[in-house]
Image: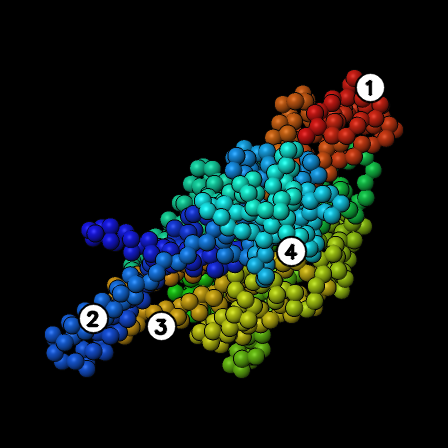
């Protein structure tokens, strides 16, 4: 055997070990794609290789001291290499079972005649063998039970089973607790399996193409071909969508390398910010539709504020009766403070009324937070902590999804985070500045804090809590009158910014403004709109935001606290975290982004642990050579930071039809987009039309993408329709349901095809 073939055979054995390793990982933690498996092979080989290098270097160092003879040392190294090579080559091939070892794996089953099995929802969820191609309904999840039996889960999440009164016909729609949903899979040759029911009957395809547990013996007719489904990682992203993603990742990797290997770290910071910007553009442009909660309401109010900046409105022309206090269907809209809406309105003035114009302010502000985090970490701990914190935020799935408007309160929380972090950054700079520059930073603190309140109310005062406590609790600062004056100066600037709007709406919209202020206060002692939880709710959901168990986050915060050089920032930063989590823990209403205002400190806490690990463990000449340090550093940074934050599969699942069918919620939304955005082409002079009978969640997007008078999901009675006409408006109605005669027979009513 030549050396090339020998190397290839050895690599195949390593890969067989990798297959065994990946099959042992639970399915929910395993990326089920060929791309991931290839990366896994590379990582496993890399780990083994580096372990070999480490062991050899350790033994070399040890034996150099113990063995003076060069020949003995060379022989010793040769023996070690031969021994390790023997271990690799001598390992037998792992048995490659047909059935995956995962507890949950997506598969297809095909008859020997070439037809795929399908849980047909149009036929009562019966299992039929009549499909030539694989779609969503042709995929099943194979769940391995503790007793080695198998349960098959259909695409609607129900389980396949039989019913005693149905002569053994297989169908989906069963609960897992039903004993008939358990099968024994008997493996045959050539990738084939036989399905056996608990009553010892074998499954076959009957004359009607139905699957039926009928046979008492194994025959060719009872055999099915089992194949594991491997989804391509980027299969649902278009090439155009992938450009900003790939660009962003390249920029971030370049930034990471330059930061470690080049003294000019300003370039690495610029690349870091540009990489974060590119990733945010990528995610923000994935959705061509408006997210239901709460982006679409923010979008429509912002659009109406383009013409009426001081009168926030949802329905600009409410032609039907409405509840003024209902923020999802009313006229004047004071449910949120106005600054982030003004920003969106200005952006749409520049870029047009579209999703990019809508989301651009969030893209920009979320990107600038990267810079703020870097500066805060650099000034309070060191540049490495600041850089890693910025990198973590740049790659954060949660931050990206907020920017894209997917998570509740979306652009409101992005703007709030920007202004809160900006106020803390300005305060940190103020503490480090000389006397000439302090006044400028005091102004910035007040401006940022006032703007934060104009986005999400009084929690925008957060910067003053830690600042004030650092004065009161530190003896040498407590008796300095100038510090109190400076704090009150910034506080006064904030008051001047946010108070005028409050006085204006109390005068212009007295009843509605008082209702909204009361609603804000009720969040503290009453569960609003079903968003409740216990005191530890925010602590428990922190893993969904940061990718770490809450107890590990506590450990990271502790390391960050110990790493901070100045006790002023120790007091302030710890108080920020404790105040926010305690306050919102006590508050009755819970939402996942309520505590996100201190996320910059959580990212810096994780960054501090990474920095400490690199400094005291990895990047020490005692352990590794300089070249090996660089290799370790870059590889581990990319792997660990990406694993904690960026999850391309999750983004793909959230924004595309990956693992979904056309009848899923997202599928229906994507189907509705061209219908909604093309209305102006179907209706002439659309700005004089009221649209009726759209789908329940589409009335707001219809008003956003089209200059209609109003849009409603219901069909009003004949009196209300006559009232619309008397006001001089025309009616267009979707034929989504049976239309009443007073609309069907009216020739002036435009009938739109249902969708």
**Residue 114 % position (x, y):** 52, 35
Tag 2 residue: 79
Q: Nearer the viewer, mark 1 or mark 2?
A: 2
Nearer the N terminus, badge 3 or badge 1? 3
Q: Is residue 110 left or right of residue 273?
A: right
- Identify the element where label 2 is drawn: helix
Tag 1 residue: 745
Q: Nearer the viewer, mark 1 or mark 4?
A: 1
- Identify the element where label 3 is drawn: helix
**Residue 708 % position (x, y):** 70, 30
Q: Is residue 206 left or right of residue 439?
A: right
Does residue 422 lie above or below 215 as drawn? Answer: below
Nearer the N terminus, badge 1 or badge 2? 2
Tag 4 residue: 456
**Residue 535 % position (x, y):** 68, 69
Position of the C terminus, as image quadrant, is: top right
Crowdedness near tag 4: few (<14), some (14–19) or many (≥20) residues, C-alpha within 10 Å: some
Q: Nearer the viewer, mark 4 or mark 2?
A: 2
For marks 1 and 4, give the CA distance.
49 Å
For marks 2 and 3, give the CA distance.
29 Å
Nearer the N terminus, badge 1 or badge 4? 4
Nearer the N terminus, badge 2 or badge 3? 2
């Amino acid at each position: 055997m030549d050396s090339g073939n020998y190397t290839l055979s050895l690599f195949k054995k390593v890969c067989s070990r990798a297959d065994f390793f990946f099959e042992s990982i639970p399915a929910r933690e395993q990326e089920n794609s060929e791309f991931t498996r290839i990366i896994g092979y590379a990582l496993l080989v890399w780990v083994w290789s580096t372990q070999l290098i480490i062991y050899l270097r350790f033994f070399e160092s040890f034996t150099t001291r113990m063995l003076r003879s060069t020949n003995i040392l060379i022989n010793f190294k040769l023996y070690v290499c031969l021994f390790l090579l023997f271990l690799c080559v001598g390992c037998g091939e792992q048995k490659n079972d047909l059935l995956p070892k995962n507890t949950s794996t997506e598969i297809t089953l095909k008859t020997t005649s070439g037809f795929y099995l399908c849980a047909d929802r149009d036929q009562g969820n019966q299992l039929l063998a009549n499909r030539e191609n694989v779609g969503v309904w042709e995929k099943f999840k194979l769940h391995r039970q503790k007793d080695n039996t198998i349960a098959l889960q259909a695409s609607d999440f129900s389980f396949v089973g039989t019913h005693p009164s149905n002569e053994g016909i297989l169908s989906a729609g069963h609960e897992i607790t039903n004993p008939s949903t358990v099968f024994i899979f008997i493996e045959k040759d050539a990738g084939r399996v036989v399905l056996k029911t608990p009553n010892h009957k074998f499954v076959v395809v009957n004359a009607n193409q139905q699957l039926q547990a009928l046979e008492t013996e194994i025959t060719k007719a009872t055999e099915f071909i089992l194949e594991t489904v491997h989804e391509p990682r980027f299969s649902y992203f278009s090439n155009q969508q992938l450009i900003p993603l790939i660009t962003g990742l390249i920029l971030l990797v370049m930034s990471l390398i330059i930061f470690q290997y080049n003294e000019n770290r300003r370039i690495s910071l610029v690349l870091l910010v540009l990489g974060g910007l590119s990733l945010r553009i990528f995610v923000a442009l994935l959705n061509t539709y408006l997210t239901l909660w709460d982006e679409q309401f923010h979008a429509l109010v912002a659009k109406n504020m383009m013409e009426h900046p001081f009168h926030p409105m949802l329905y600009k022309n409410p032609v039907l009766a409405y509840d003024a206090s209902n923020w999802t269907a009313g006229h004047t809209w004071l449910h949120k403070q106005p600054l982030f809406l003004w920003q969106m309105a200005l952006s749409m003035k520049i870029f047009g009324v579209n999703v990019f114009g809508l989301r651009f302010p969030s893209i920009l502000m979320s990107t600038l937070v990267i810079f703020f985090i870097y500066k805060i970490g650099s000034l309070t701990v060191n540049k490495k902590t600041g850089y890693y914190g910025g990198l973590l935020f740049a790659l954060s799935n949660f931050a990206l999804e907020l920017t894209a408007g997917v998570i509740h309160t979306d652009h409101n929380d992005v703007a709030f985070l920007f202004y809160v972090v900006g106020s803390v950054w300005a305060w940190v700079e103020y503490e480090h500045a000389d006397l000439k520059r302090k006044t400028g930073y005091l102004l910035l603190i007040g401006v940022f804090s006032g703007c934060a309140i104009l986005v999400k109310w009084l929690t925008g005062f957060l910067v003053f809590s830690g600042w004030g406590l650092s004065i009161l609790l530190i003896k040498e600062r407590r008796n300095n009158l100038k510090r109190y004056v400076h704090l009150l100066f910034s506080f006064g600037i904030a008051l001047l910014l946010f108070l005028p709007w409050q006085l204006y709406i109390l005068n212009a919209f007295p009843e509605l403004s008082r209702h909204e202020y009361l609603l804000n206060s009720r969040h503290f002692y009453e569960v609003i709109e079903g968003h409740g939880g216990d005191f530890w709710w925010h602590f428990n959901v922190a893993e969904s935001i940061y990718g770490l168990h809450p107890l590990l986050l506590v450990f990271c915060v502790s390391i960050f606290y110990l790493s901070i050089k100045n006790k002023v920032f120790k007091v302030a930063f710890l108080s920020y975290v404790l105040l926010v989590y305690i306050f919102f823990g006590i508050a009755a209403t819970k939402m996942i982004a309520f505590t996100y205002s201190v996320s910059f400190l959580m990212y810096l806490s994780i960054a501090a642990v990474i920095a400490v690990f690199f400094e005291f463990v990895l990047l020490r000449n005692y352990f590794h050579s300089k070249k090996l340090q660089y290799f370790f550093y870059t590889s581990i940074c990319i792997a660990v930071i990406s694993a904690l934050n960026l999850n391309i599969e999750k983004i793909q699942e959230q924004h595309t039809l990956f693992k979904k069918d056309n009848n899923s919620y997202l599928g229906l939304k994507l189907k509705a987009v061209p219908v909604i955005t093309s209305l102006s082409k179907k209706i002439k002079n659309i700005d004089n039309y009221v649209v009726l009978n759209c789908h329940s969640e589409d009335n707001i997007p219809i008003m956003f993408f089209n200059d209609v008078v109003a849009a409603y999901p219901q069909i009003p009675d004949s009196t209300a329709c006559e009232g619309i006409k008397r006001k001089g408006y025309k009616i267009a109605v979707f034929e989504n349901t049976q239309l009443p005669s007073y609309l069907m027979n009216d020739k002036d009513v435009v009938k739109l095809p249902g969708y």
